[in-house]
């Protein structure tokens, strides 16, 4: 029984079938298309992301779920594509370490390897891990860049100065993100309550303690870009708008392999117990929505806050990791100064790292900015960076922070200020 206006495909397609999709787009394009196709009598295979809607047609299709690729499937794909690129070009590339954790389909894997081969041809044709990472990143959909700031990580674990506890927690988190498919999907350790395969963490600590930097280091470790979203700018005072803004971000994030970093998470996480007015209540709905949406994001999402105390434990319980970034100790501050005052910065002989580390209790961000100020002072004077310039820069940093400049702290340099 064919409907009058339907295209009569049958006479032309003898001994053949028809593959059409994505089914959800077909249905949008014309309400009757799917009915026509199912009534045409031709063997029909519809593909798509949506589940079958009985309103499309009265046919009863056989539904076959195409599962996400297992880690094993994906590794086989990478091995196959790398082999196609040639043994000389891909010698020494460890597909498992580089790409086992990335959610890419067959076509994307092929394109990533092709892109890597093209950039390798600029040199000797040998594909490096960096070529491959760039090829992978090039497969990311572009939509998220309109909503979040993209950072291509240029740092590694060496750049991050943290105590052993924090370091360990961060490497554990990276490992969790790397192996989540193996553990949650292949080994069926999926958590209950419809939770997805995302990994979520909270970084809590004062400004300048290295939270953003740590996220960048983890992204680099995973070979991913970091996308940062400032939650304070997502929150809208109109009811329902915050969720819409978040939905837009997550919809775009679905198409990228990335670490998602939500800065100023306290803008959304009020204390649930302190519901004082209607606005607080909506803030709770917003944070519940954010958490629920985080779980469906198939990747690593990090929330950052300066105010751990502000975050309700009902929420923190649902996160995979909570990492506190303390103020650095004198020993760590010394390591921070060493990293900030490094060649090619021209340094005078009088730099006293022990004094700088002991005397000034500041976070890494302040040490970085004092060093930068000292470098500008030296550039303006046409001199090297001297101890005096650094101490002057620290004084400026103290004033910025609203801290008193005391002789007790500045010691023998106090008189020079
Ligand atoms: N633990 C650290 N190790 C190495 N460098 C650090 C560390 N903490 C801070 N820095 C330096 O200070 C800069 C600023 O740090 P970062 O942006 O990561 O701080 P933050 O914790 O995200 O601060 P905020 O809460 O203000 O966003 C870094 O780019 C880095 O140069
Ligand atoms: Mg930050």
Image (cartoon, rainbow, N blue to C red):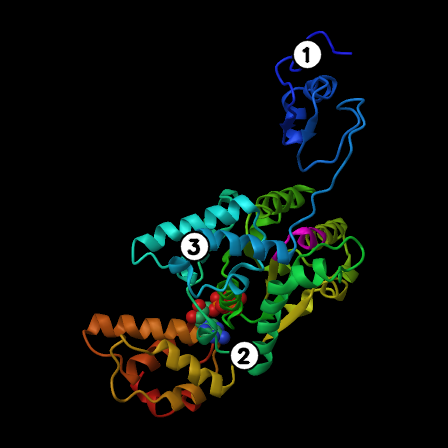
Left or right: 79 with respect to 36?
A: left
Secondary element at tag 2: loop
Q: What is the quadrant of the C terminus in the image?
A: bottom left
Q: Residues within 10 Å of mark 3 (few under 14, many from 20)?
A: many
Q: Which contiguous range is marked in magenta? A: 292-299
Residue 342: image quadrant is: bottom left
**Residue appearing at x 45%, y 62% in the figure:** 153
Secondary element at tag 1: loop
Percent x, y for residue 95? 51, 61
Left or right: 408 with respect to 144?
A: left
Pointers 2 and 1 in contact (CB under 8 A)? no
Which residue, given by chain and number where applicable, does mark 1 sit on?
6
Mark 3 or 2, nearer chain start:
3
- The answer to whether mark 1 is within 8 Å of ligand 2 is no
Mark identifier at residue 134: 3
* Extreme residue in the front direction: 15
- Front-lying residue, 95 or 342: 95
Left or right: 40 with respect to 91?
A: right
């Amino acid at each position: 029984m064919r409907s009058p206006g339907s295209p009569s495909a049958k006479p032309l397609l003898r001994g053949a079938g028809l593959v059409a999709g994505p089914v959800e787009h077909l249905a949008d394009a014309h309400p009757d298309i799917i009915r026509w196709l199912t009534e045409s009598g031709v063997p029909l295979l519809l593909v798509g992301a949506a589940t079958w809607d009985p309103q499309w047609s009265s046919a009863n299709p056989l539904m076959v779920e195409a599962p996400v690729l297992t880690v094993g499937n994906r590794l086989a794909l990478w091995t196959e594509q790398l082999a196609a690129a040639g043994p000389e070009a891909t010698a020494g590339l460890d597909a498992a370490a580089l790409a086992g954790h990335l959610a890419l389909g067959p076509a994307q894997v092929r394109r990533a390897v092709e892109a890597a081969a093209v950039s390798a041809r600029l040199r000797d044709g040998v594909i490096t891990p960096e070529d491959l990472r760039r090829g992978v990143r090039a497969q990311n959909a572009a939509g998220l860049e309109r909503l979040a700031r993209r950072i291509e990580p240029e740092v590694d674990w060496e750049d991050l100065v943290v105590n052993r506890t924090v370091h360990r927690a961060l490497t554990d988190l990276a490992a969790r993100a790397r192996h989540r498919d193996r553990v949650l999907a292949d080994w069926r350790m999926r958590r209950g309550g419809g939770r997805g395969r995302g990994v979520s963490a909270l970084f809590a600590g004062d400004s300048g303690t290295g939270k953003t930097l740590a996220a960048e280091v983890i992204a680099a470790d995973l070979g991913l870009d970091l996308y940062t979203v400032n939650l304070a700018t997502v929150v809208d005072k109109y009811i329902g708008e915050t969720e819409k803004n978040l939905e837009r971000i997550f919809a775009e994030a679905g198409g990228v392999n990335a670490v998602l970093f939500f800065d100023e998470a306290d803008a959304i996480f009020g204390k649930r117990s302190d519901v004082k007015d209607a606005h607080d209540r909506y803030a709770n709905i917003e944070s519940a929505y954010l958490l629920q949406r985080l779980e469906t994001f198939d990747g690593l999402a990090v929330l950052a806050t300066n105010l751990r105390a502000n975050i309700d434990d009902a929420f923190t319980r649902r996160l995979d990791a909570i990492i506190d970034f303390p103020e650095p100790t004198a020993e760590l501050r010394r390591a921070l100064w060493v990293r900030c005052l490094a060649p090619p910065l021209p340094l005078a002989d009088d730099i006293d790292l022990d004094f700088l580390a002991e005397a000034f209790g500041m976070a890494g961000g302040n040490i970085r900015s004092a060093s930068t100020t000292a470098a500008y002072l030296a550039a303006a004077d046409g001199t090297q960076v001297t101890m005096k310039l650094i101490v002057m820069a620290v004084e400026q940093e103290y004033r910025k922070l609203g801290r008193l400049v005391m002789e007790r702290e500045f010691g023998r340099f106090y008189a020079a200020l």
